[in-house]
Image: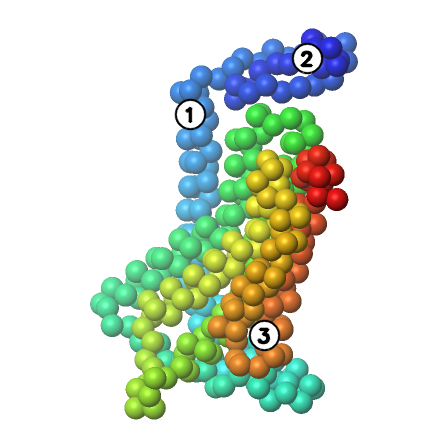
Amino acid sequence: MSANGYFCRYNPYGMKSKSRETGENEEKVNEMTFWEHLTELRARLIRIFLSVLVFAILAFIYSRFIFDKILLAPKNSDFITYKWLCSLGRFLHVDSLCLQKVNIEIININLSGQFMTDMYISIFAGIILAIPYIFWQVWKFIKPALYEKEQRYARSAVFIMSALFFLGILFSYYFMVPWTLNFLGTYQVSSSVSNQITLSSYISTVVSVILSVGVVFELPVVVYVLAKIGIVTSSFMKKSRKYAFIIVLIVAAIITPPDVFSQIIVTIPLWLLYEVSIIVAKRVEPKDIIADTE
């Protein structure tokens, strides 16, 4: 027992954890060996693999729905985002919000192209749908190495990370993907060159945009971890605002038509994400750092 009323014990992951002395007997927990760590990790990875496999099989069974109603929908001019933007454009009297008729023609030039794409999307969908369970298994693995207070935060982090990831996917699907397809699908170096998009090119573009934005929406969680260990501070992020804003504007300018309203629609959510990250950093960074910056 230490002088401040705490005593230390070793948890199953070989790390010290503190608990307030209550007079009750503590359960005796043995320190795990290196091979026991690997066994535990293997069990978690097997569970993750099986969850992805189950969701991938379901996605393969309903692949026609996934392709026709989800992945291939943004290439058509009747996609819901185009209707929303046209309605908003008419309300604001901004014709540029009505994007050009996309209607991208998709072709397949490989004999096994459609089958392999079906398998690829099934696996990708399996990973996406299993994300909450994957986060949960990661938390269960690191849980014994955390203090009791950290465990409460970690439980919330599983929900927050899952929610942010799916929010990023929805934002990218309904906003980033349509504008990306509209820009790339209608861009021409010459009027004599027509666009015939291969299936693999279309799918890889859509998947990369969806996945990258989903990961970007985890920025507050990443900032939380970095601020917790003192690598990133809220003052640094505040000083870097102008650079972050320029990066966000560049991204918005690339994927949207050349008008102010379209860029604002994409810029606002990404900028809000950065501001939320600043708030998160300020709440978790060490108090001495906050005092030094004030």
Q: How far is mark 1 from mark 3, CA to CA?
A: 50 Å
The residue beneath circle 2 is 7
Q: Secondary structure at mark 2?
A: strand
Q: Residue at x 30, y 86 (%)?
A: 193
Answer yes or no: is residue 126 visible. Answer: yes
CA neighbours of label 3 inside 10 A, class few (<14), some (14 to 19), many (20+): many
Q: Residue at x 58, y 15 (%)?
A: 10
Q: Out of 33 and 288, give the one closest to the viewer.
A: 288
Q: Are marks 1 and 3 in contact (CB under 8 Å)?
A: no
The x, y position of residue 173, in whole percent, is 53, 66
Q: Residue at x 57, y 81 (%)?
A: 259
Which numbered disc covers residue 263? 3
Q: 294 above or below 204?
A: above
Q: How far is mark 2 from mark 1, CA to CA?
A: 29 Å
Task: Specify the amino acid type for callout 3.
Answer: Gln
Mark 1 vs mark 3: give the one in front: 3
Q: Secondary structure at mark 1?
A: helix
Q: 212 above or below 203?
A: above
Task: Specify the amino acid type for callout 1.
Answer: Thr
Answer yes or no: is residue 159 visible. Answer: no
> Considering only order in the chain, which callout, 2 or 3, is on the residue closer to the N terminus?
2
Can you say which quadrant of the picture contains the N terminus? Answer: top right
CA neighbours of label 1 inside 10 A, class few (<14), some (14 to 19), many (20+): few
Which numbered disc covers residue 39? 1
